[in-house]
Image (cartoon, rainbow, N blue to C red):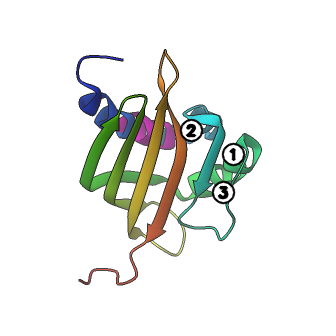
Amino acid sequence: MTMNPEKDILSLFKKWNAALLSGKPDQVVRLYAPDAILLPTFSNLVRHTHAEIRDYFVHFLKNGPSGRIDEGNVRVFGGLAVNSGIYTFRLKRGPVKKVQARFTFVYRWDGGRWSIIEHHSSAMPEQGGK
């Protein structure tokens, strides 16, 4: 772990978004711990395994997503860290072109790197509203 874990956690979203931009599901899945849970934006299924997480991203990446954090809130608790807030995705394909969602990433330090152990993303109930 570096001397500035908050900065490290903020950089993890950039790494995750770059994996999305690659269009390669396996690059995205590598960022998740083997025991990670994904509660995705565009699926009603909870994803419990790398195979299930990969399945979600195979379909999601077909839309050409690109994300940005609108508001992030990082908290570090030793070997665990949380980044939660609001992000916006622009999609190149599909019926939806832009979606704003609430997110929570929970990361675990394994002695060599941070891995996603929990990722929850849900579309804002009132798109563009308060």
Q: Give the CA separation, mark 1 to mark 3.
A: 9 Å
- Quadrant in the picture for residue 26: top right
When the figure is inspected, residue 39 is found, relative to residue 36, above or below; the finding is below
- Write the start and end of the magenta stretch as one range: 14-20
Marks 2/3 in contact by CB < 8 Å: the verdict is no
Distance from the alpha carbon under mark 1 to that under mark 2: 8 Å
* Magenta stretch holds residue 16: yes
Q: Secondary structure at mark 1?
A: helix
Query: For mark 3, does the 10 Å Cα neighbourhood hold few (<14), some (14 to 19), or many (20 or more) residues?
Result: few
What number is the disc on residue 59?
3
Helix, strand or loop for the magenta stretch, by majority: helix
Contact (CB < 8 A) between labels 1 and 2? yes
**Drawn side of residue 66 relative to residue 112, left or right:** left
1 or 3: mark nearer the eye? 1
Measuring 26% from the left and 84% from the top, which residue is drawn there? 129
For residue 104, side relative to residue 45 (left or right): left
Task: State the image coordinates of residue 127 (x, y, percent, origin top left).
Answer: 34, 80
In this view, the residue farthest toward the right is: 51
Q: Which residue lies at the image location 23% right of the left edge and 83% below the top edge?
A: 130
Element type at mark 3: helix
How many marks are shown on the rendered structure? 3
Residue 76's label in the rendered image is none
Q: For the residue labelled by badge 2, is the local secondary structure a helix, a strand or a loop?
A: helix
The quadrant holding residue 51 is top right
User: Please, is residue 78 above or below residue 24 in the view?
Assistant: above
Q: Name the N-terminal-most of marks 1 and 2.
A: 2
Q: Circle 1 is placed at which residue position?
A: 54
Of the two numbered discs 2 and 3 on the same chain, state the one appearing first in sequence: 2
Q: How many other residues sit within 10 Å of disc 1, few (<14), some (14-19) or many (≥20)?
A: some
Q: Amino acid at mark 2?
A: Val
